[in-house]
């Protein structure tokens, strides 16, 4: 499958949310960002964003924060590479019956396919949270998503 590109990302900044810090040498914009269709995959390192001018900046974006949708993922703006990074956590088990109570259920990958990995002592069709967040793999195809970003720059 093809990876998401900056041309697959839609950005809109309403007049009301443009230059919301009047009288300073910095601009602050609130933009709506949308991408994904469950067909294009997550690129290694994050989803590239359109040029900074699309967001209303001329020189640089110095800071950005994402108000994530309620889809279970964490979104981070990578200011150095001008990308959106997506992180996930935990393990979801599949619906294949566990071989026995000890072996546990098969784990699912981010695409929802069962892996040949059994998690001992787990139940089928259950979410488990383990450890730190991990960036999504390149094979993951995010569903259509939309969120707000607040950006500061010049």
Image (cartoon, rainbow, N blue to C red):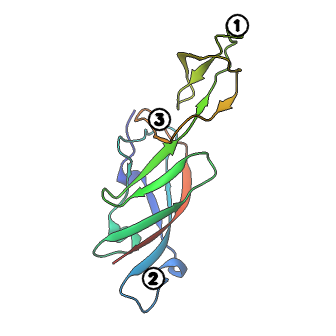
- Compared across the picture, whether 27 is left or right of 88 comes to left
Q: Which of pointers 2 and 1 lies earlier in the amino acid sequence?
A: 2
- Compared across the picture, whether 51 is left or right of 14 comes to left
Q: Residue at x 39, y 45 (%)?
A: 4
Q: Nearer the viewer, mark 1 or mark 3?
A: 1
Identify the residue position indicated by label 1 in the image: 100
Location of residue 60 by image quarter: bottom left
Secondary structure of the residue carrying tag 1 is: loop
Secondary structure of the residue carrying tag 3 is: loop
Task: Kindly report the distance in space between the C-alpha atoms of the residues bearing marks 3 and 2.
Answer: 35 Å
Q: Position of residue 110 (x, y in %)?
A: 53, 32
Give the camera-side residue of 35 and 71. 71
As drawn, 88 above or below 83: above
As drawn, 124 above or below 142: above
Q: Position of residue 67 (x, y in %)?
A: 56, 61
Q: Residues within 10 Å of mark 1 (few under 14, many from 20)?
A: few
Identify the residue position indicated by label 2 in the image: 19
Contact flag, marks 2 and 1 (Cβ < 8 Å) = no
Task: Kindly report the distance in space between the C-alpha atoms of the residues bearing marks 2 and 1.
Answer: 60 Å
- Compared across the picture, whether 118 is left or right of 27 comes to right
Q: Position of residue 102 (x, y in %)?
A: 67, 10
Secondary structure of the residue carrying tag 2 is: loop
Location of residue 103 by image quarter: top right
Identify the residue position indicated by label 3 in the image: 140
Q: Which of pointers 3 and 2 lies earlier in the amino acid sequence?
A: 2
Q: Nearer the viewer, mark 2 or mark 1?
A: 1
Q: Residues within 10 Å of mark 3 (few under 14, many from 20)?
A: some
Location of residue 154 by image quarter: bottom left
């Amino acid at each position: 499958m093809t990876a998401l590109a900056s041309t697959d990302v839609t950005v809109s900044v309403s007049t009301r949310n443009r230059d919301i810090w009047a009288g300073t040498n910095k601009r602050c914009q609130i933009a709506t960002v949308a991408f994904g269709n469950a067909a294009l995959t997550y690129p290694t390192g994050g989803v590239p964003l359109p040029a900074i001018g699309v967001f209303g900046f001329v020189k640089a974006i110095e800071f950005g924060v994402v108000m994530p949708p309620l889809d279970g993922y964490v979104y981070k703006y990578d200011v150095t590479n001008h990308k959106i990074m997506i992180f996930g956590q935990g393990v979801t088990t599949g619906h294949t019956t566990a071989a026995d109570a000890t072996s546990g259920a098969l784990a699912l990958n981010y695409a929802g396919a069962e892996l040949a990995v059994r998690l001992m002592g787990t139940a089928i069709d259950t979410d488990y949270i383990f450890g730190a967040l991990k960036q999504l793999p390149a094979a993951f195809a995010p569903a259509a998503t939309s969120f707000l970003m607040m950006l500061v720059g010049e």
